[in-house]
Amino acid sequence: MSTFAPAPADSTAATAEPKFVGTPRKVTAHQTQNEALSFEKSAPGKRGYKLAPLDVPAVDPKTLLGEAARTEPALLPELSEIEIIRHFTRMSTWNYAIDLGMYPLGSCTMKYNPRVNEFVSRIEGIAEAHPYQPESLSQGALSILKDLEGCLLEITGMDAITLQPAAGAHGEFTGILLVRAYHQSKGNPRRTVIIPDSAHGTNPATAAVCGYDVVNLKSNADGGVDLEALRALVDEDTAALMLTNPSTIGVFENEIAAVAEILHAKGALLYMDGANMNALVGKTRPGDFGVDVMHLNLHKTFSTPHGGGGPGSGPVACKAILEPFLPTPVVQTDGAGIHHLVYDRPQSVGRVRMFYGNFGMFVRALAYILANGPDGLRQTTEDAVLNANYIRAKLEDLYDLPYKTPSMHEVVFSDRRQTRNGIKTGDIAKRLIDYGFHPYTTSFPLIVPGALMIEPTESESREELDLFVDAMRQIAREAEENPAVILAAPHSTRISRLDETGAARKPILRWKGPPASTPLTPDDSPAREW
Ligand SMILES: *Cc1c(COP(=O)(O)O)cnc(C)c1O
């Protein structure tokens, strides 16, 4: 019996029936193969290399290492070169990637990373630069830092910046440390940080880690800040408001200037979570609308690799009042145009990252910014917003749209209509995999029960967006006519529904083999648990 309903005519989705009965060891209905662990594939004596015969006297390891010398060889997999190559190549095909198709994971801005960024970051003098090189030999690297800082200050409208933080949440941490140091310098670090219920989950976590009590602020019916509620909350104990803008429902905070005024009147600061700058770059600048400190996610807005693809980078930009507290070192340029790393900054919060941050990401982000230029970046923003609104317009007759406020870079639906047939957002997301797309973000933000959070980014063409819309419309039809097919999805993957609770609570993080002295054969390898 086919569990796979017919695909829309112009969809690229697979339509094949599962072709295999039972559970063959190697072949699955999925185009990629099963793959054992390298330890399980190991056989004694296999080698992936050949060495020339020893032409110097052999030395007993004990002479060199004493007690530390091994008495038995380490239990490492023994494989031939082609087996290793195939092992990793096969596993690489199990993954979904932005290079494979659309990745509409809301809040994550999974845009395409242009190859020119990779090319530039691999230029020898850049890739091989050592962080301990003296300043005089690092002027090129330092000017990359300086140029990127300049671009990001122009884009954000802020006065000063640190590139050190290694991710968005790390940037939040650094930003709130600046806030704390600022208030402390006035004699009192204050006690609370106000956070709207539409904020990203990292915001309250950051405030708590920095020693603040979190005060929750309810959103108004449009998904924005309720100014009256804010006025009632802000007092001399308020250190800052952390505002995600555009918020996690993809809504721009229209009252942002008024929000800033309310805070500033009580000496509190406005922190903006700028991870969603993909909707603002080239259109408006946080520095111009009252923000005191913010972070950016280079790995979102500025197209550096993301998630498993590379380290993140979360620069923090601030107004001049916070500049004395920035992490050290800062890059300063003297009258002769020579860049210096300056450590002597008595009010600094100290280092938040070794060396200068994830330098390779700075190179990629700068390449991206310069390749696009101001007009290109503005176009990027407009395309990102247009794409999200295109999806909204094409799906809002079938999916519930809880906030009618204009969408920015992402659109958030709810599963309210589909739940009538027992279908939840997670089920729709899993079915989407069968149609060849990475799922959108499910069940977040929390202010929308059963959320479907979709962020296409500017990377997608009209053709790809239409395929996505087709898939989503088809799934909405299936929810009415054949909910069972959705509840059992995905049908086209190697593994279908995982035990998500088990995976989170009892993860199996390492392979436990037999004792080192037991020879490994494929037959006595322990049962694999996935
Ligand atoms: C992604 C994101 C973060 C966290 O960034 P990381 O780099 O994952 O730490 C914070 N806030 C918002 C709004 C985000 O989208």
Image: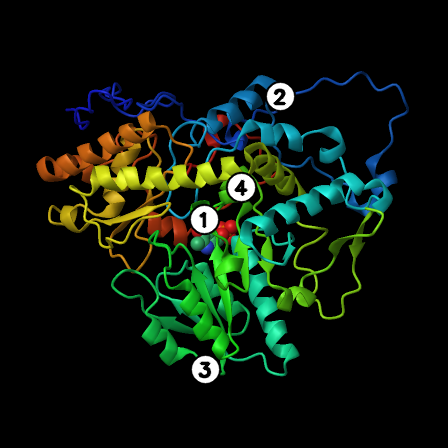
Q: CA distance from mark 1 to mark 3?
A: 30 Å
Give above or below for 79 relative to 218: above
Q: Earlier in the sequence, mark 4 or mark 1?
A: 1
Q: Is residue 191 left or right of 501 when viewed as pictured?
A: right
- Tell me the residue at 50%/35% (across/down): 376
> Which mark, by number, is residue 280?
1
Q: Which mark is in front, 2 or 1?
A: 1
Q: Residues within 10 Å of mark 1 (few under 14, many from 20)?
A: many
**Residue to which mark 4 is pinned:** 302
Front one among 4 and 143: 143
Q: CA distance from mark 2 to mark 3?
A: 70 Å
Can residue 130 be seen in the rendering of this structure? yes
Does dot 3 land on a helix, a strand or a loop?
loop
Q: Which residue is mark 2?
A: 46
Residue 445 point in image, percent of width and height: 33, 55
Regarding mark 1 in the picture, which secondary structure is present there? loop
Query: Neighbour class for label 2 at 10 Å: few (<14), some, many (≥20)?
Result: few
**Whole-number angstrom distance, CA of label 2 to CA of label 1:** 56 Å
User: In terms of sequence position, does the residue under pointer 2 or pointer 3 come before the other?
Assistant: 2
Labels 4 and 3: the sequence-earlier one: 3
- Left/right of residue 106 with respect to residue 241 in the rendered view: left
